[in-house]
Amino acid sequence: MSNNTPPTGISTGTLYGVSVGPGDPDLMTVRAMRTIGACPVVAYFCKRGTSGQARRIADGCITAEHIELPMVYPVTVELPPSHPDYGRQIEAFFDESAERLAEHLAAGRSIAALNEGDAFFYGSFMHLFLRLASRFPTEVVPGVTSMMCSASLLPRPLTLRDDVLAVIPGTLGEEALLHALRNADAAVIMKLGQNLPKVRRAVEAAGLADRAWYIERASMADQRVMPFREAPETAPYFSQIVIPGEGLRR
């Protein structure tokens, strides 16, 4: 791993974790757009053969003057996360990606690292932050989360009065999912995808199926919103289950 020590007399660039929102470019913040415009380098994660969701959202802010740094995942769905080769490949990829960014930062070029939703809310930017924040000035530009975008599509508030909200990753085991649901007044279950059958069983077992909603690709052109019991058998990555609270006073 290279040291990337800046040459004498050169100030380092700043790494910005730029949150670009859930999908609709209109939900990008003014600060996010200004930050992208002010940075000479734009970095983003993507799958092989694509430019990635974050890059698509920010397309109107990126010009020919920008240096673009696509960071192409070596694996996505080819291996399960539990496979030992997955962990080795993905960690090496994050190390290599961070060093590519470090070269620009050490040369004094600031970077807008794009992230769907919010960079510190299950964001891919965290992998860069953990590797670079101790070495270079780093700032996070907050953004609209997919969770709140999904909640805004429902016919009742997500939380009110004394509701306690739980944000639950669908990657948890079924018993852990059920425990989290039973201990919350309102809930958002993230990371559905192949976890949907397990999540569906937990929601049913917790007695929350009648209050739950399924939201797919919130704010995108092909978004879908429906009661949980009408949800499809399979779910894409950009989907969530949202369970509004009942607004009880304690």
Image (cartoon, rainbow, N blue to C red):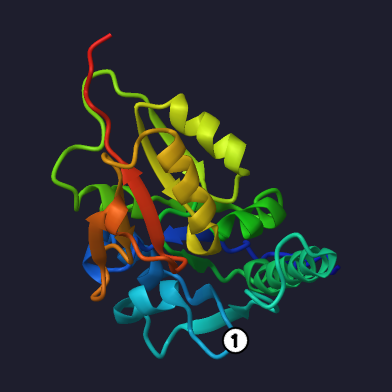
Residue at x-position 62% and y-position 62%: 11
Comparing 122 with 170, the one in front is 170
Percent position (x, y) of residue 174?
59, 42
Q: In this view, does 9 lie to the left or right of 164?
A: right
Q: Quadrant of residue 221 in the image?
A: bottom left
Comparing 197 with 42, the one in front is 197
SS at mark 1 in the image: loop
Q: Quadrant of the N terminus?
A: bottom right
Q: Name the residue under label 1.
A: 48
Q: Is residue 195 left or right of residue 250?
A: right
**Residue type highlighted by circle 1:** Arg
Q: Is residue 81 left or right of residue 13?
A: right
Q: Quadrant of residue 53 in the image?
A: bottom left
Residue at x-position 79% and y-position 69%: 92
Q: How crowded is mark 1: few (under 14 residues within 10 Å), some or many (20 or more)?
A: some
Percent position (x, y) of residue 37?
36, 72
Comparing 196 with 158, the one in front is 196
Residue 145 drawn above or below residue 210? below
Percent position (x, y) of residue 9?
68, 64
Residue extending farthest to the left is 155
Q: In which quarter of the image is the C terminus?
A: top left
Is residue 145 visible in this depiction of the protein?
no
Residue at x-position 27% and y-position 41%: 210
Residue at x-position 59% and y-position 52%: 137
Residue extending farthest to the top is 250
